[in-house]
Image (cartoon, rainbow, N blue to C red):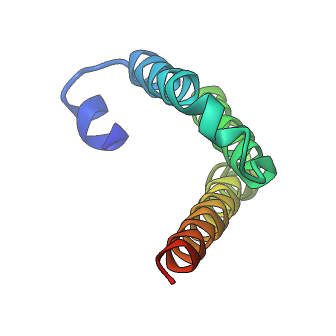
Amino acid sequence: MTLILSRLGISKKLIYLCYGSGVFLYAFNFWPYIKTTPYLPLIAAFLLFAISRFEDIINTRSLGVHAMLEDGTKLLALLNLALYFWHVCHQEIWRNLTVDS
């Protein structure tokens, strides 16, 4: 999505500001529920996404370092995000199954 919007002439910094605003609004609206979950993987995912985005803005000269910092942190962030949502969904399914039984 970022690549498509940046090719349309929209600044990456503006796109990242929109992403950050979305994360802030999500956290603000769902914070009471998030506090009841093991949210460490969620926080790690957001920090890793931030590192990936900062690396995209900075553009280091070394292609290897750039790839590891941008794509590697993005992969780790996605794994943490998937782990968090898997755990929360698993927890909610078991909670609903035990209530219905």
Picture quarter containing residue 61? top right
Instruction: Name the residue: 66% across, 60% down.
Output: 84
- Residue 32 in the image: state x and y as whole percent: 64, 31
Instruction: Name the residue: 56% across, 21% down.
Output: 28
Residue that lies at the very extreme toward the front in this rendered image = 101
Vertical arrangement, residue 13 with respect to residue 49, above or below: above
Instruction: Name the residue: 50% across, 25% down.
Output: 29
Image quarter in which the N terminus is found: top left
**Along the line of sight, which residue is nearer the eye, 63 or 11?**
11
Q: Is residue 26 left or right of residue 18?
A: right
Vertical arrangement, residue 87 with respect to residue 33, above or below: below
Q: Is residue 59 visible?
A: no
**Along the line of sight, which residue is nearer the eye, 79 or 55?**
79
Picture quarter containing residue 33? top right
Q: Is residue 72 left or right of residue 24?
A: right
Vertical arrangement, residue 15 with respect to residue 41, above or below: above
- Residue 93 in the image: state x and y as whole percent: 52, 74
- Residue 74 in the image: state x and y as whole percent: 62, 54
Residue that lies at the very extreme toward the left in this rendered image = 8
Q: Is residue 47 visible?
A: yes
Instruction: Name the residue: 36% across, 18% down.
Output: 11
Question: Number of callouts in the render?
Answer: 0
